[in-house]
Structure formats: structure tokens, C-alpha cells
Image (spheres, coloured by chain):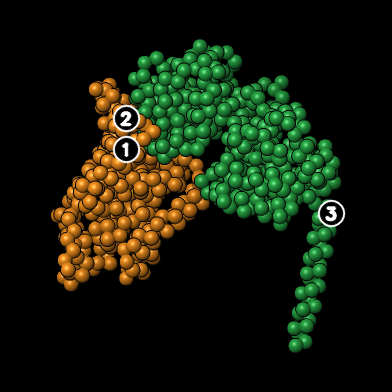
């Protein structure tokens, strides 16, 4: 009996102690939430995002935090499942009471989480690609990655300069490929592009020679664009060379903007052009480039901390985190509403993805200059001088 | 004509892979009545182990050999640790076990290897060969030739060796096979090991063309299963014909009809075939005696 009473006292005491310590913590830390697809099919996006956030939150805290307060990062892994993402979003808002959120690896999970953050009036900086995230503009939702529409525009801009207007599309039927294909078809008339061949392939298909043969035999195709993601574009590129189509200019999307694409496609990748973020060619940027400093520093920090090659996806997380941190500094407050207002006022923020100028009507804030047109030469990326 | 040849060869190449996966299904199905949905993971293992072994400096031939051995060991373990303990269970239960095993293998592969795509160099270069205007990767011949060798070897084994006949006997009637002194457990293990080897060989042969990653197995298993059903589950000839046919349907569907609906087209044909001949093209008619 006695021991039971002692136990009770102990329990009460420890609960009180816990409560006290939490109060103490709450005063000098501020919670930032994140839901990422660290595992699952989108893990190649979520993993670098996760590592980037952890790396830089530690760095920020080591340097004294933001406005004298340490950041506490709460990350949940949705495993690529939009349902789980929504549950975690609710938990972030209701239990963890985060002041803002940087996360949402895929468009699917982002769209599922948006209503939660809109209702709770907590700013949400998404790391997802699709334009639906910020179009129409929602009060509390922002995003950092370029949209597929911008990639199409960048490619068409380059084609226009080369006086090539009759193009063939060969697109993956996965979410990325299908969405970018739709955007390309939509913006093509604006740039005077005529899509005269339009083929598709499954995301796990292992041979695309049939589709490419069809395009090859379509009279008048002046260039081919391949909106796609993963291993598909690498196989398309290899089949493209196999069929001897190298005399027709070939464009990939930013979806393949990683070194592994060059490795996988091998010699077949020579001469392929693609729009990509400055991060990929940090060392090749001229010293005068405003992004040079931030991209080389991020690349160096990420690669030395994780021993993995840098990816644009981690860069999106970097941009999201620092847009938020700078807004917090300007707001000098931990109130979600004030931070939201300051995020929207972000001007001239130099990130890894480009120079961000947000406004009440533009919650992305990037223009086409955020993309660099690259050409693969000698197994490496090369900046294409404009107009060549 | 060049166009037709191009579709034909790409269809045959992809079809040969489906055929090898379908053969793996067939072998295990024959011995145990189980459809092994971890078959695709053997293909993945063949490719991934070869990639990583050769990246570690092992010569390609040896790396390929290691990959086959690894796959066989895992096939035997699958049988010993998961299938054998549940031998009294119904076929459906065993099939569910294999699905679980495939998820497990995929997860482990994602951790041990990585989640990136990998390639192997073509065994005999990568300069396309021109055949009457169709550009063919040299590796295609390796895939077709390799598939042919596997099929012939399997045929000789099943029809002309005592052990092979024991497999067929087990397939025909397990109880009767046991009564005439065949150790059916060993036969089952043999079937799992053999089909793991076939899967791994398929994986090694196609990686230079299709690339590989920890999760290539899922779709291949699905396509291989469809091919096996089309040809008639349990019939090795049917598996090969079904696989090649499925590959050709996809290639010609994409080439002459619509690339968007090529898979739908292929599966539509399969549905029609199964509707007309539910046991598949070469399937045995199953007679239930009451």
C-alpha cells in the first residue's frame, strides 16, 4: 500500500516536472513542422529534403537561432501516402502547434494537406512541383520548386530562338510526365509551337523504340521533347540514339536534372538539352551570377554532411526554410499570421532555385530566369549561351 | 518494312524477358500449385547484384555468376523459411506469403543497395546493328539467345532427366509422387531454386537495355504473370509463347495503334483469349472428377 502511494507521488511529481520543463522549452524554442515522403516511392525527393532541413536547422540553432529563439523541427514521414500526410498535418497543427510548415514532398500530399493549414491559418511552404499548389492562390500556401509549365516555356523559348517550331512529344504517363505534357500542349500556341507527334510510354516501360520510330517517321518533326521522370527518359534517350535520331534536337525536362541521368543514358545523352536549376551547374556559373554564392555554399554543405551528390529537391527545402526564417526575422514574431504576411512580401530572395519575388498574386515568385538551359557535352552539363 | 522490323524486334526482346519471368512462374506452379509473386524480385536481384558486384571491381561474368547464386540462395531460403513451414496451407495462403516475401525483398534491396537506377554495359558493345533498316541493340540478341538457351535447358531437364521427371510427377500428383518415393520437399526446393536462377538470368540479360532498380520486379512479375496466364499456367511452351506474344502486342500496339493505350490493348487481347480459352493457349484442360 505504502509503495503504491510513493509511486503515485512520484508520478505526480514527474508529470509536474515534465509540464514545467515543457513550459520552459516553449519560451525559448519555436516549432517548425514538416511532412515529407522520406520513404516510399518518392523517397528520392523526400530524403534530400529531410537531410537538408535537419542540417540547416542545426546550423541555424548553432548560430543562435532566429530572433533569439531556437528552432525545433518536427518532421513526419508520410511514406508517399497522401492520407497519412493529412493526418500528420492535423497533428502538426493541433498537437505540435507549429508556427509554420515547410514540407509536402509530392503534389498529392501537398494538396491533401492544404485545407488543414488554410483552416488553421498556418503558413505552408510546399516543396511540390505542380502549379495547382499555388494556382489559384491560397492565402497561406506558398511553394519553392519551379513548375512544369515554366520548364515547357523555357524549352519552347530555346526552340523559338533556333527557329524550330514543329515538335514531337514523347511523354511518360506518370504524374510528372502527364502533367508536364498537358502544360506543354497548353503553352505551345503562345510560342508558335506545333505539336505534330504526341506519343506516350508507361513509367516502367523498358523499350520506347516503337514510339520513337513513329515520331521518326512523322514528316517534318524538327525537335523532340520528352517530359518524364525516373528511368524512362534515360531509356528514351538511349533508344533515340539507337534509332539514329541524333540529327533531330532532343530536349529533356528538369525531371532528369541529376548526374544519374547522364550515367544511365551514357553516350546517348550527348547533345541533349534540358532546363535546370542553377544548383546543378554551380561551378560553371560566372562569378557575376547572383546565385553563384548560395548554390556553391549549399552544395558544399550538403555534400560534406551527407556524402551524397546534391539534388535540386534538397535545394527546394533549403529555399523554403530560409524564406520562412527571413520572414520570421522581418516579422520579429512567432505569430503565424504575421509570418505569412512577411513570406508574401519576400523580395529578391536568392535561393538555390532562383531569385524569389513573391506577391499577393504570386506565391512562387520565380520567373524563367530561374531555369538555365543546359546541354550535355562530354558527359557533363554545359550552360547554353542564349540564342545558340 | 523497316518500321515493321523495328517493332518486331523490340517486341521480341521485351517479350523474351516476359517469357523468362513466366517460365519462373511455371516451374514453381508446376511443382507446388503456387503462383510465386516474388518472381519479379529474383529478376531485380539478378540485375542489382550484378551491378553492385561489378561496381566493386568483380569481372562481369563472375558478377553475373554471383548474382545467380545469391538469387538461388534467396529462393531456397524463401522456400525453406516461408513456404515449407506453411505446407499444409491452401495455395491462396501460399500465394499471399509470396506477395509478402516480394515486399520484404524489395524493402531490403532498397536498404542494402539504394533507390537509384543502375545500368550495366552491353555485353558486346552498344553500337546498334542495322537489320534491313531497323536499328537493333546487340544486347537484344543476348536476351533472345539467353532466353532460348534457358528454355531448351529447362525442356531437356524436365523431359530427359530423372530429376526433371520427378518435378513433373510432383506437378501431376503430389501424393502419388510421394508414394513412388519422390521427396516432394526436395523437388519444391529445387523448383524455387531453379526459378530464382531463371529470374536472375533474365535480370542480368535485360539490365543493359532496361536499367534496373530495387523495384523493377513488381511490373515484371505482373507482365510475366499475364504472359503465363495467356500461354496457359503450368505449360513451359505456353509461358514462352505467352511472353513473346505479350511483348509483340505491346510493341505493335504502341507502333500502329496508340502508345497511350498499348497496355490496355495488350490486356484486352489477353482477356479475349482467356474468355475463349480459359485455360490459356496451351493450358491443360483441368477436369475435376467427383
Q: Which residue is mark 2?
A: B257
Please identify, in this view, whether the residue under mark 2 or under mark 3 is nearer the observer.
Answer: 2
Residue A321 rendering spot, x and y as whole percentages? 71, 40
- State how far apart marks 1 and 2 are (Cα): 9 Å
Q: Could you tell me which chain the residue with mark 2 belongs to?
A: B
Residue at 67% in and 28% down: A366
Can I make out residue B269 in this image? yes
Q: Which mark is residue A27?
A: 3
- The hue used for chain A is green
Query: Residue B117 appears at what percent x and percent y?
Result: 47, 40
Q: Label 3 near label 2: C-beta < 8 Å? A: no
Asked if the residue at tag 2 contacts the one at tag 1, i.e. Cβ–Cβ closer than 8 Å, the answer is yes
Estimate how packed mark 3 is, as few (under 14), some (14 to 19) or many (20 or more) residues with alpha carbons within 10 Å.
few
Q: Chain of mark 3?
A: A
At horizontal 18% and vertical 58% (from top left) the residue drawn is B286
Q: Secondary structure at mark 2?
A: loop
Residue B177 at x, y = what percent? 19, 67
For numbered disc 1, what is the local secondary structure? helix
Which quadrant holds the N terminus of chain A? bottom right
* Location of residue A354 with respect to A331 vertically, above or below: above
Among the two numbered marks 1 and 2 on one chain, the one whose residue lies closer to the N terminus: 2
Tell me whether marks 3 and 1 sit on the same chain: no
- Within 10 Å of disc 1 (Cα), the crowding (few <14, some 14-19, many 20+) is some
Distance, label 3 to label 1, CA atoms, is 63 Å
Q: Residue at x 37, y 26 (%)?
A: A212
Of B127 and B271, which appears nearest the observer?
A: B271
Q: Label 1 belongs to which residue?
A: B265
> Is residue B53 visible to the viewer in this orientation of the structure?
no
Q: Which-is-in-front pick, marks 3 and 1?
A: 1
Q: Is residue A127 above or below residue B177?
A: above
Q: Which chain is orange?
A: B
Helix, strand, or loop for circle 3? helix
Amino acid at each position: 500500500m505504502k509503495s503504491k502511494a510513493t509511486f503515485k507521488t512520484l508520478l505526480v511529481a514527474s508529470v509536474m516536472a515534465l509540464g514545467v520543463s515543457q513550459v520552459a522549452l516553449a519560451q525559448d524554442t519555436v516549432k517548425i513542422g514538416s511532412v515529407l515522403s522520406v520513404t516510399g516511392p518518392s523517397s528520392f525527393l523526400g530524403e534530400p529534403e529531410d537531410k537538408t532541413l535537419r542540417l540547416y536547422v542545426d546550423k541555424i540553432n548553432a548560430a543562435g537561432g532566429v530572433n533569439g529563439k531556437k528552432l525545433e523541427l518536427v518532421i513526419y514521414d508520410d511514406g508517399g501516402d497522401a492520407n497519412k500526410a493529412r493526418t500528420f498535418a492535423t497533428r502538426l497543427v493541433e498537437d505540435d502547434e507549429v508556427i509554420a510548415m515547410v514540407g509536402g514532398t509530392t503534389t498529392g500530399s501537398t494538396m491533401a494537406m492544404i485545407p488543414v493549414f488554410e483552416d488553421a491559418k498556418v503558413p505552408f511552404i510546399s516543396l511540390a512541383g505542380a502549379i495547382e499548389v499555388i494556382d489559384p492562390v491560397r492565402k497561406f500556401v506558398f511553394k519553392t520548386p519551379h513548375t512544369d509549365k515554366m520548364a515547357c516555356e523555357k524549352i519552347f523559348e530555346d526552340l523559338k530562338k533556333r527557329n524550330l517550331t514543329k515538335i514531337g512529344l514523347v511523354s511518360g504517363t506518370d504524374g510528372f510526365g502527364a502533367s508536364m505534357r498537358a502544360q506543354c500542349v497548353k503553352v505551345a500556341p503562345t510560342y508558335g509551337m506545333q505539336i505534330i507527334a504526341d506519343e506516350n510510354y508507361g513509367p516502367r516501360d523498358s523499350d520506347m523504340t516503337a514510339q520513337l520510330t513513329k515520331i521518326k517517321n512523322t514528316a517534318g518533326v524538327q525537335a523532340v521533347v520528352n517530359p518524364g521522370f525516373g528511368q524512362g527518359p534515360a531509356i528514351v534517350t538511349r533508344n533515340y540514339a539507337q534509332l539514329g535520331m541524333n540529327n533531330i534536337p532532343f530536349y529533356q525536362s528538369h525531371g532528369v536534372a541529376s548526374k544519374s541521368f547522364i550515367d544511365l543514358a551514357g553516350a546517348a545523352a550527348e547533345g541533349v538539352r534540358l532546363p535546370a536549376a542553377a544548383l546543378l551547374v554551380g561551378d560553371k556559373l560566372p562569378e557575376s551570377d547572383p546565385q553563384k554564392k548560395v548554390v556553391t555554399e549549399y552544395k558544399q554543405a550538403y555534400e560534406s554532411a551527407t556524402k551524397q551528390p546534391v539534388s535540386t529537391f534538397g535545394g527546394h527545402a533549403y529555399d523554403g526554410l530560409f524564406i520562412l526564417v527571413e520572414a520570421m526575422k522581418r516579422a520579429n514574431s512567432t505569430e503565424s499570421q504575421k509570418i505569412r504576411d512577411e513570406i508574401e512580401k519576400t523580395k529578391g530572395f536568392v535561393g538555390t532555385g532562383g531569385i524569389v519575388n513573391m506577391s499577393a498574386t504570386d506565391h512562387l515568385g520565380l520567373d524563367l530566369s530561374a531555369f538555365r538551359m543546359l546541354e550535355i557535352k562530354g558527359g557533363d552539363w554545359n550552360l547554353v549561351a542564349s540564342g545558340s | 518494312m523497316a518500321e515493321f522490323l523495328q517493332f518486331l524486334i523490340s517486341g521480341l526482346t521485351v517479350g523474351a524477358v516476359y517469357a523468362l519471368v513466366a517460365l519462373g512462374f511455371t516451374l514453381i506452379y508446376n511443382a507446388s500449385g503456387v503462383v510465386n509473386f516474388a518472381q519479379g524480385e529474383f529478376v531485380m536481384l539478378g540485375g542489382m547484384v550484378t551491378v553492385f558486384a561489378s561496381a566493386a571491381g568483380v569481372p562481369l561474368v563472375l558478377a553475373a555468376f554471383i548474382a545467380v547464386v545469391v538469387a538461388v540462395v534467396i529462393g531456397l531460403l524463401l522456400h525453406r523459411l516461408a513456404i515449407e513451414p506453411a505446407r499444409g496451407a491452401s495455395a491462396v495462403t501460399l500465394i499471399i506469403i509470396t506477395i509478402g516475401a516480394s515486399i520484404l525483398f524489395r524493402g531490403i534491396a532498397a536498404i542494402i543497395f539504394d533507390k537509384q537506377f543502375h545500368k550495366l554495359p552491353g555485353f558486346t558493345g552498344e553500337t546498334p546493328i542495322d537489320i534491313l533498316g531497323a536499328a537493333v541493340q546487340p544486347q537484344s540478341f543476348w536476351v533472345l539467345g539467353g532466353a532460348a538457351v534457358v528454355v531448351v535447358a529447362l525442356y531437356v531437364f524436365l523431359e530427359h532427366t530423372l530429376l526433371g521427371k520427378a518435378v513433373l510427377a510432383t506437378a501431376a500428383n503430389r501424393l502419388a509422387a510421394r508414394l513412388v518415393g519422390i521427396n516432394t520437399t526436395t523437388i519444391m526446393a529445387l523448383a524455387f531454386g531453379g526459378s530464382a536462377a531463371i529470374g536472375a538470368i533474365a535480370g542480368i540479360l535485360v539490365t543493359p537495355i532496361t536499367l534496373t532498380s530495387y523495384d523493377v520486379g513488381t511490373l515484371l512479375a505482373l507482365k510475366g504473370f499475364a504472359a503465363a496466364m495467356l500461354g496457359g499456367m503450368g505449360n513451359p511452351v505456353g509461358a514462352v509463347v505467352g511472353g513473346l506474344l505479350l511483348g509483340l502486342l505491346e510493341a505493335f500496339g504502341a507502333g500502329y495503334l496508340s502508345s497511350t493505350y498499348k497496355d490496355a490493348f495488350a490486356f484486352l487481347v489477353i482477356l479475349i483469349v482467356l474468355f475463349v480459352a480459359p485455360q490459356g493457349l496451351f493450358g491443360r484442360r483441368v477436369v475435376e472428377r467427383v
